[in-house]
């Protein structure tokens, strides 16, 4: 007994100061196949029967104490090593950005972030789709069949027909992501889709590549009141004008019924344009800003959604136009010229993510 106590104390003392290599050595010499404790245990069989049980228990206790101490010391050493490594490898993320490396955020990116922030606050999530679309998703499922006149309005870039004979297109709007989402997801649905769109059109006010943001809300009871509330709130938040006049003007889109165009109030004074009312509420004019409507039941059907159960609204708007109006950018083409002087002028502070609560603080220069 005294021997095992002494053996235990000796081992525990060595374990307490051992490094990882020594620990393994101590383990092998004490508990390994021919370790000291293992050998003592083998010897129990040779003891007189009346001492075997006590000696066995005693040795087991020593064995557990030693194994436990080794494990504990090992865990401690490993944690210390990790702490040391973390301290040594530390990157100081609070370091200021080198001024020459700080690129401003492009107004398109900023505008998308602001719009997404507003819609996310209303419970929308962001959905995404490919730039190369099927003819079906871009047109047919949206109730624009091949002979439909709306096709002519789209100035579509067509790709060469694939092996299956169908033509693919560069998506002419973000609306095909409505189809993708409704095909893949069960309602209720509430998404916005910011992204690139393409049309074979190029002049002072048209670019062959531009951006849109699409919205879709599908539920059992979603009605025109929700559409209006949502879009009025959006326009006022985005342009940061609390009493911004917003008008819904009847229109036509194949994928919505009824459809409307949304205009916001503006004033033109001395050649300038200001969003919202003037001081004396005169000189009110209107600017078209987006298209919207209640999702056409045919579109729901095309996506396998039962229009007698589900209904909803959709909308789409051009990002460039909204950015030009909000930030007073006069020429569409400058968005894509990659002129660093333009970007320094119209760009936004990097690392400041827009938020509705902060009123998009950290904005333009
Ligand atoms: N896709 C339309 C366009 O590119 C915009 C649009 C209008 C989208 C009405 C919609 C909508 O979702 O409901 O001109």
Image (cartoon, rainbow, N blue to C red):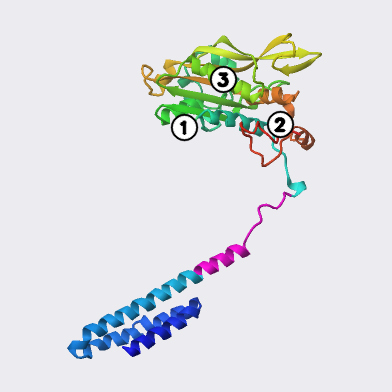
Mark 1 and mark 2 in contact (Cβ < 8 Å)? no
Queried on whether the Cβ of the residue with tag 3 lies below 8 angstroms from ligand 1, the answer reads: no
**Left of 341 or right of it: where is 315?**
left
Q: Which mark is residue 163?
A: 1
Q: Residue 295, position in %: x, y?
A: 47, 17
**Residue 140 sits above or below residue 363 on the image:** above
Of 24 and 344, nearer the camera is 24
Q: Residue 62, position in %: x, y?
A: 34, 80
Extent of the magenta region: 78-97
- Marker count (numbered): 3
Rate crowding at label 1 as few (under 14), some (14 to 19) or many (20 or more) other CA atoms within 10 Å: few
Of 328 and 13, nearer the camera is 13
Q: Nearer the viewer, mark 2 or mark 1?
A: 2
Q: Is label 2 in a helix, a strand or a loop?
A: helix
Q: Is residue 343 magenta?
A: no
Q: Tell me the residue that label 2 is attached to.
A: 336
Q: Tell me the residue that label 3 is attached to.
A: 231
Q: Residue at x 41, y 24 (%)?
A: 303
Q: Is residue 165 visible?
A: no
Q: Nearer the viewer, mark 3 or mark 1?
A: 3
| Quarter of the rendering occupied by the C terminus | top right
Q: Residue 132, position in %: x, y?
A: 54, 31
Picture quadrant of residue 31: bottom left
Structural distance between the alpha carbons of marks 3 and 1:
42 Å
Q: Is residue 212 visible?
A: yes
């Amino acid at each position: 007994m005294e021997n095992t106590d002494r053996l235990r104390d000796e081992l525990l003392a060595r374990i307490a100061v051992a490094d990882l290599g020594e620990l393994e050595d101590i383990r092998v010499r004490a508990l390994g196949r021919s370790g000291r404790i293992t050998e003592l245990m083998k010897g129990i069989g040779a003891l007189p029967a009346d001492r075997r049980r006590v000696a066995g228990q005693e040795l087991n206790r020593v064995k557990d104490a030693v194994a436990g101490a080794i494990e504990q010391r090992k865990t401690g050493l490993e944690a210390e090593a990790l702490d040391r490594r973390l301290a040594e490898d530390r990157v100081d993320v609070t370091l200021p950005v080198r001024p020459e490396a700080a690129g401003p955020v492009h107004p398109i990116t900023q505008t998308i972030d602001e719009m997404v922030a507003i819609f996310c606050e209303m419970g929308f999530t962001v959905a995404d789709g490919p730039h190369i679309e099927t003819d079906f998703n871009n047109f047919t499922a949206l109730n624009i069949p091949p002979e439909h006149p709306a096709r002519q309005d789209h100035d579509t870039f067509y790709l060469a027909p694939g092996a299956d004979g169908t033509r693919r297109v560069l998506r002419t709007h973000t609306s095909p992501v409505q189809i993708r989402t409704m095909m893949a997801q069960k309602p209720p649905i509430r998404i916005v889709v910011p992204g690139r769109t393409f049309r074979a059109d190029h002049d002072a006010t048209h670019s062959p590549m531009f951006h849109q943001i699409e919205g879709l809300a599908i539920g059992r009871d979603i009605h025109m009141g929700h559409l209006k509330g949502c879009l009025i709130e959006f326009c006022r938040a985005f342009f940061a004008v609390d009493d911004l006049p917003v008008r819904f003007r009847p229109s036509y889109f194949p994928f919505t019924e009824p459809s409307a165009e949304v205009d916001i109030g503006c004033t033109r004074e001395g050649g300038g344009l200001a969003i919202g009312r003037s001081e004396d509420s005169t000189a009110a004019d209107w600017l078209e800003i987006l298209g919207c409507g209640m999702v056409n039941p045919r579109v729901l059907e095309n996506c396998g959604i039962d229009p007698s159960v589900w209904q909803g609204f959709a909308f789409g708007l051009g990002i460039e136009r909204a950015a030009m109006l909000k930030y007073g950018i006069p020429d569409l083409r400058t968005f894509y010229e990659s002129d660093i002087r333009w970007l320094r002028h119209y760009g936004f502070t990097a690392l400041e993510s827009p938020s509705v609560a902060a009123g998009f603080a950290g904005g333009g220069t």
